[in-house]
Image (cartoon, rainbow, N blue to C red):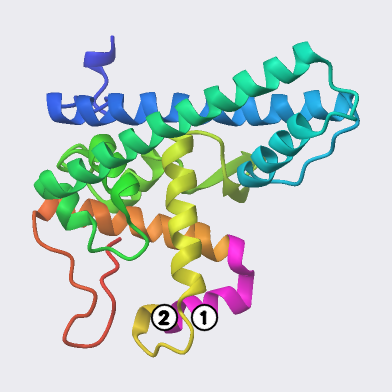
Amino acid sequence: EAGLRPDMRFVPLKSVEQQDIQSLHRIRERYIHQRTQLINQVHGLLQEYGVISGRGQKALKQRVWRALEDADNELSMLMRDLLAEQMTELDRLNERIQSLDKRVEQMSHAVGPCRQLLAIEGVGPVVATQLYSALGNGDAFKKGRQASAYLGLTPTQHSSGGIAKIKGIGRTGQVSLKAALIRGAHSVINTVGDKQDAKSRWLRSLVARVGKNKAAVALANKTVRTAWAVLHSGQSYCREFNDGSALMVS
């Protein structure tokens, strides 16, 4: 039945290289989730014994070791052993994540399309490899907006009774890639300063109108469109054209 519908859209097939990158990121994300779960669990366990830790992994590790060295607190020997084991597991997870981060960085420089994407502002090794894994050569999309919608970075629309309401981005698409794109967009916004190029002026104006968070989502949207143009055309990214306008492909 799907083959009889001319307007049916199909998920693009991935190459072996894209599948490898996707698998690498999925394993990396699993380790990151496990690390977050472990940190949250240790926070909760410490609070049960009246030991409060500051936010962040570094503060937690320092607090745990201080608690283990304190012979006067309420921690039993069993709990001390368990906490020490959790810290050892946390170190192992950090080592695995760092190892995968190195592989991601190596892949971003070894694969041609990923190297081209690294030239785009707000795109690092993680985003470049994920974008290439998701979009491939871009041939599955007619324009950049379709690629952005595929990743879940376009506004959602709710229509009823002939009235259309445009809302923010939904929860569809690749959550980890969207989060990485928005983090990259925030870093670009934070470094705009007094730059006078077209893109920086546009960003300052956008932040003044809608705030940093919405501006970051808008920039992430444009980043995907630009990435699609680079992948689809095979040309290198050029920040400025002769007329001074930044490369923004719709």
* Image coordinates for residue 228, horizontal then vertical, percent: 24, 51
Q: Main secondary structure of the magenta part?
A: helix
- Residue 151, by quadrant, is top left
| Vertical side of 161 occupied by 164: above or below | below
Residue drawn at (90%, 30%) of the image: 72
Q: Tell me the SS state at disc 2.
A: helix
Residue 22 sits inside the magenta stretch: no
Residue drawn at (74%, 29%) of the image: 68
Q: Are marks 2 and 1 in contact (CB under 8 Å)?
A: yes
Task: Please provide the residue range marked out in magenta.
Answer: 201-213
Nearer to me, 208 or 24: 24
Q: Which image quarter holds the N terminus?
A: top left
Alpha carbon separation for disc pair 2 and 1: 6 Å
Q: Which residue is mark 1?
A: 204
Q: Which residue is mark 2?
A: 200
* Image coordinates for residue 163, horizontal then vertical, percent: 65, 47
User: Is any atom of residue 73 visible in this view?
Assistant: yes
Q: Amino acid at mark 1?
A: Arg
* Image coordinates for residue 174, horizontal then vertical, percent: 43, 34
Residue 208 sits inside the magenta stretch: yes
Residue drawn at (56%, 35%) of the image: 171
